[in-house]
Image (spheres, rainbow, N blue to C red):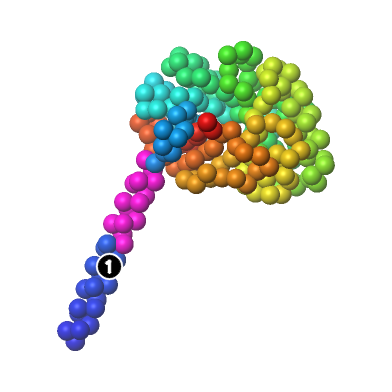
Amino acid sequence: MQWLGTRIGRWLAAGVLLSLVMVAGWIYAMGWAPAASKYPIQGVDVSEAQGSIDWTTLHARGASFAYIRATIGAAGRDSAFERNWAAVAAAGVPRGAIHLWSFCQDGVSQADNFVTVVPRDANALPAVLELSFSPGCDARPDRATLIAQLKRFLTVAETHTGEPMLLKISRPVARAYHIGAAIPRPLWEAANFLSPDYAARPWRLWQASDMRRMDGVEGPINWDVVAR
């Protein structure tokens, strides 16, 4: 039976080693960011999910810009938008607003929500229209209908902001609708750790991690970089 005890001991040692490797990998992933030498402009995008944020600390740790969710669909409003919008400016961090698209509502109603909540600011970063499938909406309009609704949204929202918006498109939405090929706006793609290439054109912003942990905010935060 000695051989059995030896084998069990080896299994246990291997299990402990594997656990240590996994923990080390997880710790590394939570602190990872793309190299500043390759992407010198890096920042965050946030919503009410991040809770209270110390923007001065976050800025000191390397966040050189911040995108803040403002509105969702035709009526949803991020409860932390006004607080974050003011605090980011006070910390001296360039800021931009995000609207999260709803596939269940028309473009003009969503644009009306966005322009009501987001103040005009000539110094703000270009605003963002974010497109991703969400559990609360199962509607999947045909491509022509969706593109038409997006264009209606952009007409109203860009009149308010005074400049073209960015399109932050998730991989599933890009595959289903090929929006980047139909609407000529700068693209923002998302993929943890590896630079993505799933949209119609090269990205201008890349959400490089959705799990980064940083001083100044509790829990994970989205970390983003700007293409050179």
Residue ID at (63%, 35%): 187
Judging by the rendered image, the residue that carries numbered circle 1 is 14
Residue ID at (55%, 27%): 68
Under circle 1, the secondary element is helix
Binning the other alpha carbons within 10 Å of mark 1 as few (below 14), some (14 to 19) or many (20 upward) gives few
Q: Is residue 127 left or right of residue 29?
A: right
Depicted 126 relative to depicted 39: above or below: above
The quadrant where residue 150 appears:
top right
Residue furthest out toward the left: 2
Q: Is residue 138 left or right of residue 144?
A: left
Q: Position of residue 18 (x, y in %)?
A: 31, 62
The quadrant where residue 119 appears:
top right
Segment tinted magenta in the rendering: 18-31
Of residue 104 and residue 63, the one placed in the foreground of this image is 63
Q: Position of residue 226 (x, y in %)?
A: 52, 31
The quadrant where residue 91 appears:
top left
Residue ID at (43%, 38%): 34
The amino acid at mark 1 is Ala
Of residue 77 and residue 18, the one placed in the foreground of this image is 18
Decide whether residue 86 is among the magenta residues: no
Q: The N terminus lies in which quarter of the figure? A: bottom left
